[in-house]
Image (spheres, grey):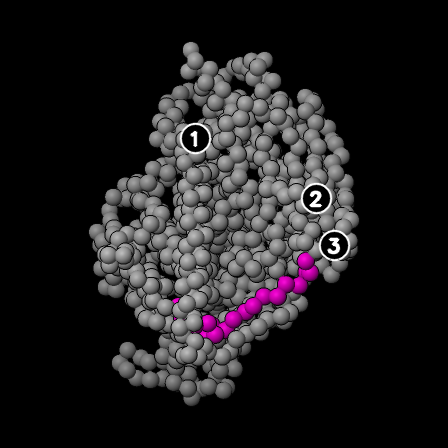
Amino acid sequence: MGTNPSDLIKSIKTENSSVPDSGKEQNQEESTNVVKSVDTQLSKESSQEEKSEQIIEKSIPSTNQILHELDHRSTLNFNKSSSLKTSRKGRTTAKNTALDYEPPTNNNQNRTSIASKNQINETSETEHVTSSATNALSNTKRGLHDTFKIMKLAADVHDTLFIEELKDSVSPLLRALAIRQKYMHHSCQSYSTTIEPFLAKILEEDDHYQRTSLNVNLPKKEESDLPTTVAIKVENPFSKPLLPPMDACVRVEKGIYHVYTLNEQKQWIPAKYKSITMDEFIEDYTLISKMIVDGPLQSYCHRRLQYLKTKHELHTLLNEVKEWSEAKSASHRDFYNIRKVDTHIHAVASMHQKSLLTFMKKKMQVSSDMKVYKKPDGTMLTLKQVFDELKLDINHIDIDQLGVHADRHTFQRFDRFNANYNPAGKAMLREIFMKPNNHIDGVFYAELLKEVITNLEVSRYQHAEFRMSIQGRSMDEWDKLGKWFLKNEMHSTNVSYMIQVPRIFTAHRAGGKLKNFEELLTNLFQPLFDATIHPESHPDLFRFMRYFTGFDSVDDESKPERSISTCHTIDPDQWNTNENPPYAYYLFYMYANILTLNQLRRSRGLNTYQLRPHCGEAGDVSHLATAYILAENISHGLVLHSSSVLQYLYYLCQIGIAMSPLSNNSLFLSYNRNPFLEYFQRGLCVSLSTDDPLQFHFTKEPLMEEYSIAAQIWKLSSIDMCEIARNSVLMSGYPDEVKKAWLGVGYKQPGIAGNDIRRSNVPNIRIGHRYEVLCEELRLLKLAYHSRQEEDTTEDSF
């Protein structure tokens, strides 16, 4: 499926011819040059990251110090009212201090500032602020200047109350931000482009903290004037030659893969890769867990979250008309023709029920004599014989008899939900039509998915990230999946793929498929390392690895489990009972091996992978603490509403949350109680996704179904939906060059500089509001940090 009718991608060059043998030496030389250039770049990036981490470690109290502080604070009586002790010097510092952080600037950039006054008022005041917006209708140097209003509350200026409350909690919050930065950098995953420079700036020693305006920088002219159509080169999987093997090998140590390379003396030495040990993770995990239940932190974070929601409501009242006006200025752009990515959809359930039934009937008409199933005794059955043995008449089966749609009977019943994957309640039909590994090599499954992909291509602007399962039962699962992908030509510009790993070690162990947990990890990661180091050993897998973007971890989170703190000392090779490891145990060992794999692949100039698990759909809030540390973004996140501290951290770090209200409505939480709208108003990076269209949707455009129902129930405006769609692109695993084509070349820049209304249809007024509010929260952290530093310095002087 290599076609793409999108008007944003007009020039697609598909290379169908393979590289001749005579060019192998040239290819190897080019690969060597690429590796050398990559190594040079990586060494620079590594030194910068190490320098940044050293500054953070010296400036912010260590994890042990903060843990001691939280333990000490938990013994105090929080019911006693604390008097507000604010010195005159403290008031002056709070009033004159500001967030000294600005996005990277360039002399050639156009700049405007959002002016803010430092007058103390106990009442609310509004002020007109001028914000620049690029003119989507003109190619001239003149920009479009729109004036919009920012509701400025007294607390924005009179920060003393917040500073006094935050001083005792700022160190844990900053340490939590630094922890996530460390884990994301080590594993080559992305981190907030706003938080990263903030952490570096806040720790610089400066005697003068002058309040400055929040400068919003527009893209360079040469970038903003680029044509809205950017050519994307989509390559056939067979067109690129395999890389030559590298002098490296891997070794498993306590469930974690380590890479060894040959030195000049032909000796195997450990590669200089970053790593995270289980003990280090447990230390950081314990800190986040204690922060969740800390009283002062809970109070502060809850109050700030309420403030964020209210501020967005005020912004909407003041600027809705101007946002509409700016959105209308972007010609040929509306909600229907902006990019939307379904960031959470399972391939096995990506079609709707009518489509599945129609496909089954069609196959009975044209392939009834095809041998499709092998019984345990070796007997081969044709498709017609399968239906005869199941006593099903395909001509009389309707949607109700197919029985794959979720209803009220699946609420709080995950077992019934899983059973619905079997058409007409027959596991045999699922194996024939909905699995890639069967007697017919997944031909029916590929054709069924191609129908879904064709619908996406016809819709032009809708994309999906299909999740394919790897169980970890055997080593050859990866090769079979890669072969199926290439043989059936499943690549498409409208679809990317993710790998989901079910947390069902217990079932595999009880069935005799696995001896211990380390064997599952070996089956998952050994083929990936082998294909990266020696591509010729797994040619199909090597090519397929360029087309999937990340890993997911799936299962019923509501199941009871042991705490990670009670079993983290058990190594994977010693986990040989039928008890399932806890959620954090699964995720850590997936993260630790993805970390090594990503560094190896980056050293070869290959794509890297994200960790994007199901998290927070049900179960304990500790799952969200684990994902905060280890995952780039998550799916569901419903339980996040029960922890103000974690929700505030997810907001500050702008961690993506792919939410599926229709799925949740049938399984765990009714639609009117879903926290999606609250998350969106507070500024969390949320998107809408379908999860399982087979069970929850009725049309061939399930993502549009999801958006339309959300818009009706929660009264979302077109601008709201465009912002949500933009979030879906940002949190997706599509390559950087694709996101540049969809959102603009400067999409990674914070604030208005990262928005191109000609492609996103999101007004700069909305983006500027989100950025200004986030900077305000960071400014408060900075004020509290320096206030505490001054107090500590004063105490030390005595």
According to the image, label 3 marks what residue?
Answer: 136
Question: What's the residue type where badge 3 is placed?
Answer: Ala
Q: Secondary structure at mark 1?
A: loop
Point 74% across, 54% down: residue: 136
Query: Can you identify the residue that label 2 sits on?
Result: 110
Residue 231 is inside the magenta segment: yes
Q: Which residue is located at x 46 percent, y 81 percent? A: 393
Residue type of the residue flagged with mark 2: Asn
Horizontal and vertical percent for residue 250? Answer: 28, 58
Q: x, y percentage for residue 266?
A: 24, 59
User: Residue at point 23% right, 53% down?
Assistant: 573
| Crowd rating for badge 2 (residues with CA inside 10 Å; few <14, some 14–19, many 20+) | some
Discs 1/2, front = 2
- In percent of width and height, residue 354 lies at 55, 72
Judge from the rendering whether residue 145 lies leftward or rightward of residue 217; answer left or right. right
Q: Are circles 2 and 3 on residues that touch, CB within 8 Å?
A: no
Q: From the viewer's perspective, is residue 334 above or below residue 628?
A: below
Decide if residue 438 is on the left or right side of residue 770: left
Residue 583 on image: x %, y %: 36, 49
User: Is residue 559 located in the magenta-colored stretch of the structure?
Assistant: no
Chain part drawn in magenta: 226-243
The answer to whether residue 288 is visible is yes
- Residue located 40% across and 20% down the image: 76
Q: Quadrant of the C terminus?
A: top left
| Residue 110, quarter of the rendered image | top right
Task: State which tag comes first along the sequence, 1 or 2.
Answer: 1
In the rendered image, which residue does mark 1 sit on?
60
